[in-house]
Image (spheres, rainbow, N blue to C red):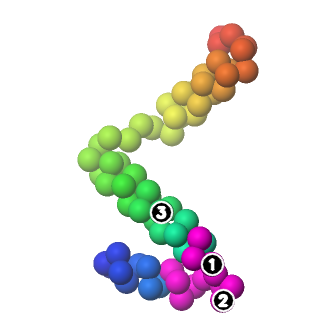
Amino acid sequence: MSVKEQIIVSVQQMPDDLTWLDLAEHARMMAAIDVAEAQIARGEGIPHEEAKRRITEWLQKLSGRQTA
């Protein structure tokens, strides 16, 4: 499905009180997902467990706690 078709389908599914900002945010999110899917297809992603480990480590550093 083309980007234009994806946008049309998305807008048709959105509530009638949609704002321009809502639409822009949704379009940015869809674009980010496209980029992420392309990166994964190229093998540039990291496994879920590795992502969780990195986030936990990062949060521990932010909170000032020592990592085990």
Magenta highlight range: 10-21
Report crowding for label 3: few under 14, some 14 to 19, many 20 or more residues within 10 A (C-alpha). few
Q: Which residue is mark 3?
A: 28
Q: Residue at x 31, y 78 (%)?
A: 2
Furthest residue to the left? Answer: 42
Q: Which residue is mark 1?
A: 19
Who is closer to the viewer here, 12 or 40? 12
Residue 64 at x, y percent in the picture: 72, 15
Amino acid type of the residue tagged 2 in the rendering: Asp
Quarter of the image where the N terminus is located? bottom left
Mark before the other along the chain sequence, 2 or 3: 2
Q: Is residue 10 above or below residue 54?
A: below
Amino acid type of the residue tagged 3 in the rendering: Arg
Q: Which residue is mark 2?
A: 16
Q: Residue at x 35, y 48 (%)?
A: 40
- Secondary structure under tag 1 reads loop
